[in-house]
Image (cartoon, rainbow, N blue to C red):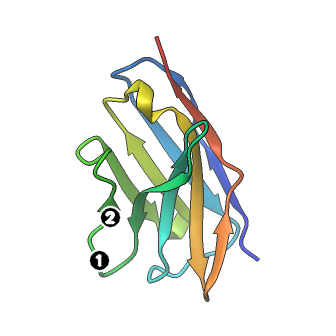
Amino acid sequence: QVELEESGGGLVQPGGSLRLSCLASETILSSDPMSWYRQAPGKERVLVARIRSGRDPEVADSVRGRFAISRDNAKKTVYLRMTSLKPEDTAVYYCHVRENGVNYWGRGTLVTVSS
């Protein structure tokens, strides 16, 4: 059972930046994907970015060029660097890991972009 804990969310003004972190309770194989999803109020949860070894990171069209995903396997952590934030980026951001065919989710961290 993998436990995931997100951190780094908060209130930020439009145009600002945040870095989200997700700490896993155990080492995740680099070949297993680690991802960030988000769910805005009244909307479905959608993929924001995904990273795994041997492949280029996947980034949603809506955030490409503004968000970047990275991981530090030694620290069991995946990051989401978010820049040029817009009000429409407001959502709960969830960390996701798929390991041995099982999906694991964190509890989420709220990002609010507002002036």
Taking depth in this image into account, of 108 and 76 the one nearest to the observer is: 108
Residue 54: image quadrant is bottom left
Taking depth in this image into account, of 40 and 101 the one nearest to the observer is: 40
Relative placement, left or right, of 19 versus 92 is left
Q: What amino acid type is highlighted by mark number 2? A: Glu
Element carrying mark 2? strand
Q: Residue at the left extreme?
A: 65
Q: What amino acid type is highlighted by mark number 1? A: Arg
Question: In the rendered view, would you say 12 is above or below 5?
Answer: above
Q: The N terminus lies in which quarter of the figure? A: bottom right
Task: Report the residue at 45% width, 79% height from top.
Answer: 30
- Residue 55 is marked as 1
Question: In the rendered view, would you say 100 is above or below 24?
Answer: below
Mark 2 surroundings within 10 Å by alpha-carbon count, few (fewer than 14), some (14 through 19), many (20 or more): some
Taking depth in this image into account, of 62 and 56 the one nearest to the observer is: 62
- Count of number-bearing discs: 2
Task: Report the residue at 38% width, 19% height from top.
Answer: 14
Residue 91: image quadrant is top right
- Between the C-alphas of marks 1 and 2, the distance is 9 Å
List the residue tagged with mark 2. Answer: 58
Task: Report the residue at 61% width, 89% height from top.
Answer: 100
Question: In the rendered view, would you say 92 is above or below 79?
Answer: above
Question: In the rendered view, would you say 38 is above or below 74?
Answer: above
Task: Report the residue at 53% width, 48% height from top.
Answer: 38
Relative placement, left or right, of 14 versus 46 is left
Q: Are circles 1 and 2 on residues that touch, CB within 8 Å?
A: yes
Element carrying mark 1? loop
Q: Residue at the top extreme?
A: 115
Q: Residue at the right extreme?
A: 1
- Location of residue 78 in the rendering, given as x and y in whole percent from the top left corner: 50, 59
- Location of residue 32 in the rendering, given as x and y in whole percent from the top left corner: 49, 80
Q: Residue at the front extreme?
A: 42
